[in-house]
Image: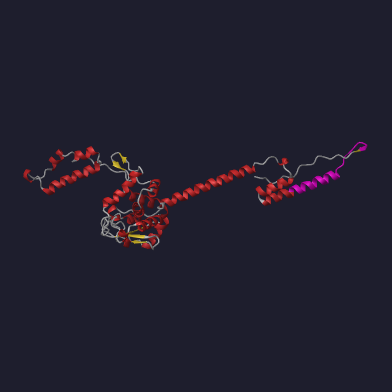
């Protein structure tokens, strides 16, 4: 069996564990009773040993991948609701498939989802929360269910028997098929990098990176926090989650906001370029005074335009006074010569 798994390219960790299961099977069935007690040394010599490899736990979903999974037209409403449940509450597969409709409260803010003690790995009841986006996808999925499935108490009922929930393999296939369709199902050496369990890594990393306490985040995803129990009031927990975590779990909303922001930036850049073109003004001498006044009123601050007009009026009065009063006598003949006039006072800068 071990040789077969190696030939198939099964991950070393999985092969390593199956080798251990096989030895336990021999002990349990007592198939060796005619040959004496089970000999572990002989087993190790006959069955090839395979070392388990450590998985890179930092690898998780990228926002762009989640957006494509949620926008995939080939994915069913059920698959998208399951993806959103994984993103927000980060349940284990066995926990996700056992959620009942009565476990979800859409009336609270944020909406709450309860995981019963009988369905959790730690055998401890806990709550978690749903984002606006997750709430929308789950409600759309509930509205799309068949009349037969509507009667089921389960969030994800079994297709053949709605009185039962879907099996774990079915939930797993929904996510894996979505990854395969979009080309995200890739191997890192010997094992696949993305799986439903990676949603738990995603949830914890988002919570921690935005200042949400680690023990609170671990409680929400159902991790064992050790000997210390969790005593934070639910109201405080919900408020902190709503402020620090929830805004970063709405991936489609973030993309739409980014698109709108990019479009607004392009519009502002276009307006700025147009203003710059209009501000490239030829020398003032080429313009009629009234044209200059209109340009100043249009392009510049009204107070600046008014200052320019006042300066222009003062300059005109000074020119008229000097022309009328300045006469210079040359020798015995009296000639009226218009003396050069000093230029206008410094005008306010247009820049």
* 29 with respect to 241 (left or right): left
- Horizontal relation, residue 36 to residue 120: left or right: left
* Residue at left offset 29%, top offset 49%: 172
On screen, residue 285 above or below 125 = above
Relative to 333, say whether 90 is above or below: below
Q: Can residue 287 be seen in this view?
A: yes
Looking at the rendered structure, the number of numbered marks drawn on it comes to: 0
Q: Nearer the viewer, residue 221 or 209?
A: 221
**Measured along the vertical axis of the image, is residue 153 above or below residue 205?**
below
Give the quadrant of residue 139.
bottom left
Q: Which residue lies furthest to the top in this view?
A: 331
Q: Which residue is drawn at 15% across and 45% down?
A: 23
Q: Residue at (37%, 61%) from the top-left corner?
A: 106
Residue 125, magenta (yes or no): no
Residue 93: image location, x then y, percent = 29, 52
Magenta span main SS = helix
Horizontal placement of 224 versus 333: left or right? Answer: left
Q: Nearer the viewer, residue 182 or 13?
A: 182
- In magenta, the rendered stretch is 311-333
In this view, which residue lies farthest toward the front?
147
Residue 197 appears anywhere in the view: no
The image's colouring method is: secondary structure
Q: In which quarter of the image is the N terminus?
A: top left
Residue 41 % position (x, y):
13, 41
Give the residue furthest to the right.
332
In this rendered view, identify the residue nearer to me: 151 or 26.
151
- 327 in magenta: yes
Question: Dividing the picture into quarters, in which one does residue 165 lie?
Answer: bottom left
Residue 351: x percent and y percent? 64, 45
Locate residue 3, reporting x and y percent.
Answer: 19, 38
């Amino acid at each position: 069996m071990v040789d077969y798994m190696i030939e198939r390219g099964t991950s070393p960790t999985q092969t390593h564990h199956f080798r251990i299961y096989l030895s336990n099977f021999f002990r349990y069935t007592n198939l060796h009773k005619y040959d004496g007690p089970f000999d572990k040394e002989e087993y190790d010599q006959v069955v090839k040993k395979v070392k388990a490899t450590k998985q890179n736990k930092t690898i998780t979903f990228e926002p762009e991948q989640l957006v494509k999974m949620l926008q995939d037209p080939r994915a069913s409403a059920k698959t998208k609701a399951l993806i959103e449940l994984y993103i927000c509450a980060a349940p284990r597969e066995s926990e996700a498939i056992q959620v009942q409709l009565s476990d979800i409260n859409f009336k609270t803010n944020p909406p709450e989802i309860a995981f019963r003690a009988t369905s959790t790995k730690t055998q401890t009841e806990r709550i978690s929360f749903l984002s606006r986006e997750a709430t929308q996808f789950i409600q759309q999925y509930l509205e799309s269910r068949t009349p037969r499935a509507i009667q089921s108490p389960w969030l994800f009922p079994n297709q053949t028997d709605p009185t039962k929930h879907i099996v774990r393999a079915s939930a797993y296939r929904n996510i894996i098929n979505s990854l395969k369709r979009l080309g995200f199902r890739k191997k890192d050496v010997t094992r696949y990098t993305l799986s439903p369990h990676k949603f738990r890594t995603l949830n914890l990393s988002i919570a921690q990176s935005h200042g949400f306490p680690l023990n609170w985040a671990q409680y929400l995803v159902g991790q064992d926090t050790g000997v210390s129990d969790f005593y934070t009031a639910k109201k405080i927990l919900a408020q902190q989650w709503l402020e620090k975590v929830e805004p970063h779990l709405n991936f489609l909303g973030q993309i739409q906001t980014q698109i709108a922001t990019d479009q607004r930036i392009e519009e502002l850049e276009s307006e700025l370029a147009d203003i710059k073109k209009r501000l490239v003004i030829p020398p003032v001498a080429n313009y009629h005074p009234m044209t200059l006044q209109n340009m100043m009123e249009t392009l510049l601050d009204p107070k600046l335009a008014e200052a320019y007009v006042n300066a222009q009026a003062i300059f005109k009065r000074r020119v008229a006074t000097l022309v009328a009063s300045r006469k210079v006598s040359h020798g015995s003949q009296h000639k009226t010569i218009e003396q050069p006039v000093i230029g206008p006072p410094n005008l306010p800068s247009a820049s």
